[in-house]
Image (cartoon, helix red, strand yellow):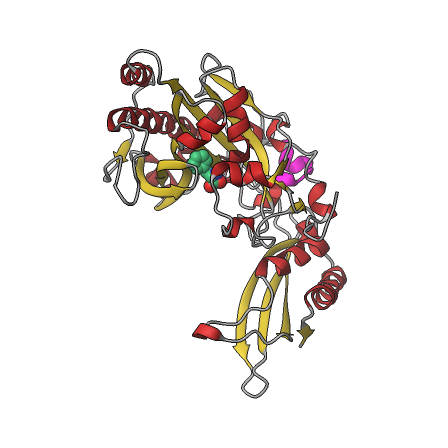
């Protein structure tokens, strides 16, 4: 099974059976149900148990990712072997689901995996929901069908900014086989469906914020909800958009979506269909809905966390239990391999995600954040020095000083062994 492309550590494989999106009363599962409820079973199949191990064809090729797309690199993706990986997004299942789904729409909620930074909003595993809806182009007046479905979506009082035309010749082109009229209709249905989801989510978030003790949080929550549509690019949709929501004083990027590339539908045996798809991250929404301050909490099995959520009650803000003191430790190293400084940038002879993975392998959830705090070039040897600050803090207990020191030393040893750096 494994080969010289394998890079998935055993610690990551332990997440596969957890399925937080199906765990009763878990905030990720509550968030999933809140969104699913806007996509009724009359039109949508809800898939929640698709296998996270997928082929690189499913995850990338079937979606039109070019061969040199950075998302394919071993520094970004967990590979089981050269042709199999842990899905990096729920879109990995688009092709097979367009082929097998008996209804006109579906949602897919699943755990997805990405090698990434370590901080309060990044974790190597998170959850996404994909949604899609199609119409049959070969029968009758498809535009009239779509507009009839559009009228069935409840209207809302969102303040919507949508400044760009649906289609832009260079930036957001109409697909060759589509008419402008049908794409206008699909886009209108997509946008209204997503706005309907946003209203449902933020109704809860606003109720919770209105109950806050903080007057400025209450004041922000009283204002009408604003969203804006902006042009985007995905290899598997065109035109494409992102939706941003104005929440507590700043614009928040919420999701990506667009009109599904016809080639993908054709390859899935659905060449008579046209439709839309979207993908949304659940952690960020759950953090905002429940005021959860750190993404690691979702994985906690501590009763003080889990007992605060109840899917059949109205939603309440999470009350943090005691915050334990953290321990900050710096680690500095020389990069032995002298990558040339072509272009004047800082030469990197390692990938930062490899540092992150080593820290995760050793420190697990005892690490709150890792940040590059210094980088310089030695004037004589022209070697590079990097310094990372690692913040050790458990969400559940006090970490003794000696334990933080042991973890820190072990991380240093692993950096030397695996990356060939020289500790300073
Ligand atoms: N898969 C995309 C992502 O992870 C989101 C997306 C899904 C965009 C479906 C368009 C359509 O960023």
Q: Nearer the viewer, residue 296 or 57?
A: 57
Residue 134 in the image: above or below residue 264: above
Count of marks overlaid on the render? 0
Residue 106 in the image: above or below residue 11: above
Residue 396 lies in the magenta stretch: no
Residue 373 in the image: above or below residue 321: below
Residue 306 lies in the magenta stretch: yes
Q: Nearer the viewer, residue 88 or 73?
A: 73
Viewport quadrant of the N terminus: top right
Q: Quadrant of residue 137?
A: top left
From the viewer's perspective, is 137 left or right of 88? left
- The percent coordinates of residue 112 (x first, y second) are 58, 39
From the viewer's perspective, is 254 left or right of 54? left
Q: Quadrant of residue 298?
A: top right
* Residue range (magenta): 298-307
Q: Residue at x 43, y 21 (%)?
A: 38
- The percent coordinates of residue 81 (x first, y second) are 68, 46
Q: Main secondary structure of the magenta part?
A: helix
Residue 271 shows up from this direction: yes
Viewport quadrant of the C terminus: bottom right
- The percent coordinates of residue 303 (x first, y second) are 68, 35
- The percent coordinates of residue 64 (x first, y second) are 47, 40
């Amino acid at each position: 099974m494994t080969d010289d492309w394998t890079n998935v550590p055993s610690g990551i494989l332990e997440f596969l059976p957890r399925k937080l999106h199906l765990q009763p009363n878990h905030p990720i599962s509550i968030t999933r149900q809140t969104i699913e409820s806007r996509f009724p079973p009359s039109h949508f199949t809800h898939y929640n148990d698709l296998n996270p191990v997928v082929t690189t064809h499913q995850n990338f090729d079937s979606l039109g990712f070019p061969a040199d797309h950075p998302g394919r690199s071993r520094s970004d993706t967990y590979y089981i072997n050269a042709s199999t990986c842990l899905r990096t997004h729920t879109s990995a299942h688009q092709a097979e689901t367009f082929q097998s789904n008996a209804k006109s729409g579906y949602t897919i909620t699943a755990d997805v995996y990405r090698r990434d930074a370590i901080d309060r909003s990044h974790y190597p595993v998170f959850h996404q929901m994909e949604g899609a809806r199609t119409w049959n182009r070969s029968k009758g007046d498809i535009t009239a069908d779509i507009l009839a479905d559009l009228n069935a979506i409840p209207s809302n009082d969102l303040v919507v900014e949508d400044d760009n035309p649906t289609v832009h010749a260079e930036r957001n082109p109409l697909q060759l086989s589509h008419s402008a009229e049908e794409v206008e209709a699909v886009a209108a249905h997509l946008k209204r469906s997503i706005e309907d989801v946003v209203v449902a989510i933020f109704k809860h978030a606003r109720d919770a914020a209105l109950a806050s003790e903080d007057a400025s949080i209450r004041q922000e929550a009283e204002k009408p909800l604003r969203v804006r549509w902006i042009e985007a690019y995905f290899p598997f949709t065109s035109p494409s958009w992102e939706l941003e929501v104005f929440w507590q004083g700043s614009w928040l990027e919420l999701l990506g979506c667009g009109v599904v590339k016809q080639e993908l539908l054709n390859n899935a045996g659905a060449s008579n269909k046209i439709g839309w798809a979207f993908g949304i991250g659940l952690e960020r929404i759950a953090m905002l809905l429940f005021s959860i301050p750190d993404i690691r909490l979702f994985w906690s099995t501590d009763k003080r966390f889990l007992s605060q959520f109840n899917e059949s009650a109205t939603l309440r803000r999470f009350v943090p239990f005691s915050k334990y003191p953290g321990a900050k430790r710096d680690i500095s190293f020389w990069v032995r391999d002298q990558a040339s400084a072509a272009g004047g940038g800082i030469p990197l002879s390692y990938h930062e995600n490899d540092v992150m993975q080593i820290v995760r392998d050793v420190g697990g959830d005892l690490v709150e954040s890792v940040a590059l705090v210094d980088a310089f070039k030695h004037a004589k040897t022209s070697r590079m020095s990097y310094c990372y600050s690692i913040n050790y803090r458990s969400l559940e207990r006090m970490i003794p000083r000696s334990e933080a020191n042991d973890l820190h030393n072990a991380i240093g040893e692993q950096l030397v062994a695996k990356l060939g750096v020289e500790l300073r």
